[in-house]
Amino acid sequence: MEQGLSETFLWGGATAANQCEGAYREGGKGLSTADVVLAGQRGVPRKRTDGVVEGYYYPSHTAIDFYHHYKEDIALFAEMGFRCYRMSIAWSRIFPNGDEEQPNEEGLQFYDRVFDELLKYHITPVVTISHYEIPYHLVKEYRSWSSRRMVDFYCRYCEVLFKRYKGKVKYWMTFNEINVNMLHPEHALGIEIKPDENPYQVIYQASHHEFVASAKAVQIGHSIDPDNKIGMMMLYPTFYAETCNPEDQLVRMEEMNKHYAFSDVMVRGEYSSNMKLYLKRHDVSIKMEPGDEGVLKAGTVDYIGFSYYNSNVATSRKDIQLIDGNMINSVKNKYLTESRWGWSIDPMGLRIALNELYGRYHIPLFVAENGFGAIDVPEETIQDDYRIAYLKEHVQALKDAILIDGVDCFGYTVWGCIDLVSVGTGEMSKRYGMIYVDRDDKGNGSLVRSRKKSFYWYQNLIKTNGKI
Ligand code: BGP
């Protein structure tokens, strides 16, 4: 008899508040960093404006209007059989400016309603506390995470969430894709690097603040409810060496070390010797406060959530041409094909990711994001066989990692289970959903939801607990 996945395996879907909620000024919500970013497209980066400027189109302002459609959307998730739903809370709904003493009750009530609706269907919420959005006021007033004061603002926010949602939410993640700080500081940290600054100094000092904030949040969360499981979340880049030339292998190792630098601090509670030397080489001196080292040690995470979309290639060659990937551009892998947005399609890379992470840290894993961005042609039932094919192969890789390799992974959520705004391009037409939303790149459309072919495929997958 084929050995199967645990009956409690958390199958589900994932979204982020700023990409789906809309209602960007309703219910007392403040402006967030995501609310001042315009739409772009492949090859055309998204621009930020100084506040909201009239006459521009900002995709997050309405997004797919989950704020008003959450009941309908959650009913569809339930119909698919979701056992969990990974979502994020918009910090600026709870603390509109970020530095208030008291939270915004209306914002808290909104998530009460969302959690109650999920629990009605026995869907376990998995909550990212900060997913690529920071109250805009904190950026203007304190220069975001470059300020140590952010630790207190963030911890106050976390404490409010842990207390308010005790008994409703047990799974948390402190920061989305924290290692993206080093790649896109403006997007991930809310910090624009000035031309005369050492970017490494700014990025790693701000990241230190996030490490401390996360470690404190873990301790606060555990003290409020010992049942809380609080994880970190990283983008897993799965790098291959371009050839077996040891020089390429060395570049690969160095690339991976940069990413592990983040997870090492959060899982092991200290900066690795490798990271310390890396920082020294880049003239970084981290300003720590007394007690920080103890805080990091005492606030290690319970699990690792990670996103995986595509793998990358490391090479020692110079003058190379790069192709796109999620947040990282690297050399083309001649063994793989790519999506329309240039991201390689590599299910084996997920199995490798799971093995590398588990082998390194030996703590439970959660596949927090995996999915396929594609253009869907609207028809009676969208025939998204390309998405099914992608998901099928990745689920097989996940099963192989668990059932053959012995990796401890307790959940898998399909990114953008319902169509939403793309982070990278701001497009709606880069769709990940198993539920279609009628809305285009300019903000036109009825917002009506419909089931794609992949909806039924995923429904069956969950029903059979992963039978492909
Ligand atoms: C991850 C982000 C998500 C999501 C995803 C897909 O990096 O955590 O928020 O958007 O990438 O990327 P994109 O939206 O650019 O296609």
Image (spheres, helix red, strand yellow):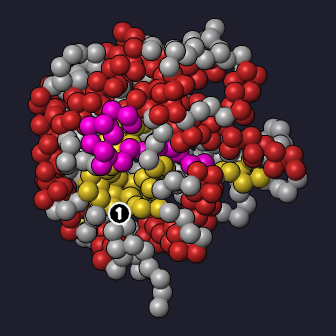
Q: Residue at x 29, y 59 (%)?
A: 84
Does 35 appear above or below 438?
above
Q: Quadrant of residue 179?
A: top right
In the displayed structure, does residue 258 sit left or right of residue 209? right
SS at mark 1? strand
Residue 85 visible in the picture: yes
Does 216 appear above or below 146?
below
> Label 1, on which residue?
10
Residue 62 place in picture, x, y as percent: 23, 37
Residue 295 place in picture, x, y as percent: 47, 27
Does 198 appear above or below 28?
above
The crowding category of the residue bearing disc 1, from other C-alpha atoms within 10 Å (few below 14, some 14 to 19, many at least 20), is many
Q: Does the beta carbon of the residue at mark 1 sit less than 8 Å from ligand 1?
A: no
**Residue type at numbered disc 1:** Leu
Q: Residue at x 14, y 39 (%)?
A: 110
Q: Residue at x 72, y 54 (%)?
A: 240
Residue 180 visible in the picture: no
Q: Residue at x 24, y 41 (%)?
A: 21
Q: Quadrant of residue 55?
A: top left
Does 124 appear above or below 164?
below
Magenta highlight on residue 448: no
The residue stretch that appears in magenta: 218-237
In the displayed structure, does residue 101 sit left or right of residue 303? left
